[in-house]
Image (cartoon, grey):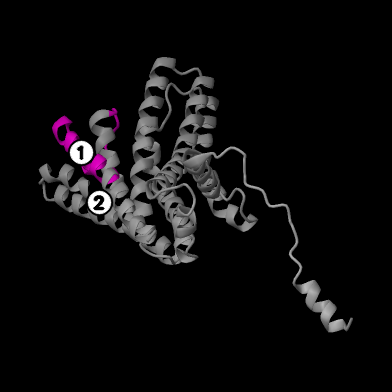
């Protein structure tokens, strides 16, 4: 038989590779949603990624916790009667660090999926738009809660070691946790909406920084001018136009915090209810905008 005929016969052979249907467990949407949440949360701190990706989040986490450790050390060494910084005040003081972390990690969470067009691949699995948005939102909020909650835990542990009043410290710690939970949800929602508008991570970082920085700077400047002119009434209302001042107003009205507004003029209970409604509206609105955005992306 000629060699050409042998080659042609071999090329036409069908091999039985033993294909069988998958008969194992099908874990479904809940498992896929949990996996996406876990992967996104780990990614927010560079876990499972390159060493270079871990530098920024871990450095910012260390910067966030370092002042708390110093405060605790001073309080123990000097046998202080109370901590020099309230739990509700800590995140407001370090808002710049929180803003940098949010700006660096929110685009990392969503922009790459948009840039490399992997969203349709996610939706080809047993996962829907709501699952993707919930997982990403929850992961970013959880990452921010770890960033803002860890220093409060250090302060609380240090206060107990310094033998400060247990009831007062526990109450303050609980108020601080409520404050940073609200901050984490608000910052996560706003930053993800902004980051989801562009597939370019750099543009997302710049946009988030600009939004958080410019809004706070503008609100603080207008509040200061209004206060200097002796018109104290609008000071509280002006705080509704910046994410961090919204958190400041809510915790001043309901969590026993001291306002950072000019003259310490924070919202009362009535105005505080408006702050709460605006806060909840922004969180819900961010979720709704993300849902709308990813319904279009998934087509």
Q: x%, y% of residue 96?
A: 40, 50
Name of the residue lying farthest toward the right: 1
- Place residue 161 in its image quadrant: top right
> Measuring 36% from the left and 33% from the top, which residue is drawn there?
88
Asked if residue 223 lies left or right of residue 91, the reply is left
> Measuring 49% from the left and 60% from the top, which residue is drawn there?
118
Q: x%, y% of residue 283?
A: 29, 44
Report the disc number at residue 220.
2
Above or below for 267 versus 19:
above
State the residue in front, 270 or 110: 110
Question: What kind of element bears circle 1?
Answer: helix
Mark 1 nearby-residue class (10 Å; few <14, some 14–19, many ≥20): few
> Measuring 56% from the left and 50% from the top, which residue is drawn there?
59
State the residue in front, 218 or 279: 279
Asked if residue 92 lies left or right of residue 127, the reply is left
Q: x%, y% of residue 293?
A: 33, 57
Q: Which residue is mark 1?
A: 277
Q: Is residue 53 visible?
A: yes
Q: Give the alpha-carbon distance from disc 2 to disc 1, as whole Å.
A: 21 Å
Above or below for 160 versus 14:
above
Q: Which residues are magenta?
A: 255-283
């Amino acid at each position: 038989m000629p060699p050409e005929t042998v080659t042609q016969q071999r090329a036409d052979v069908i091999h039985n590779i033993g294909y069988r249907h998958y008969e194992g467990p099908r874990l479904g949407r809940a498992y896929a949603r949990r996996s996406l949440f876990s992967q996104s949360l780990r990614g927010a701190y560079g876990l499972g990624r390159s060493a270079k990706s871990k530098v920024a989040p871990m450095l910012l986490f260390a910067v966030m916790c370092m002042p708390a450790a110093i405060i605790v050390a001073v309080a123990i060494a000097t046998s202080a009667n109370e901590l020099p910084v309230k739990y509700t005040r800590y995140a407001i003081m370090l808002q710049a660090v929180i803003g940098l972390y949010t700006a660096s990690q929110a685009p990392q969470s969503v922009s790459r999926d948009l840039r490399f067009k992997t969203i349709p691949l996610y939706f080809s699995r047993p996962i829907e738009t709501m699952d993707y948005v919930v997982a990403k939102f929850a992961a970013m909020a959880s990452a921010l809660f770890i960033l803002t909650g860890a220093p409060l835990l250090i302060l609380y542990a240090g206060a107990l070691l310094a033998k400060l009043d247990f009831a007062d410290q526990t109450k303050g710690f609980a108020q601080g946790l409520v404050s940073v939970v609200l901050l984490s949800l608000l910052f996560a929602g706003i930053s993800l909406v902004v980051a989801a508008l562009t597939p370019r991570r750099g543009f997302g970082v710049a946009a988030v920084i600009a939004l958080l920085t410019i809004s706070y700077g503008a609100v603080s400047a207008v509040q200061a001018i209004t206060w200097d002119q002796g018109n104290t009434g609008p000071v509280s209302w002006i705080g509704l136009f910046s994410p961090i001042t919204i958190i400041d107003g809510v915790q001043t009205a309901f969590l026993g915090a001291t306002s950072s507004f000019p003259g310490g003029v924070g919202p009362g209970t009535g105005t505080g209810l408006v702050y709460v409604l605006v806060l909840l509206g922004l969180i819900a609105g961010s979720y709704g905008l993300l849902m709308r955005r990813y319904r279009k992306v998934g087509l």
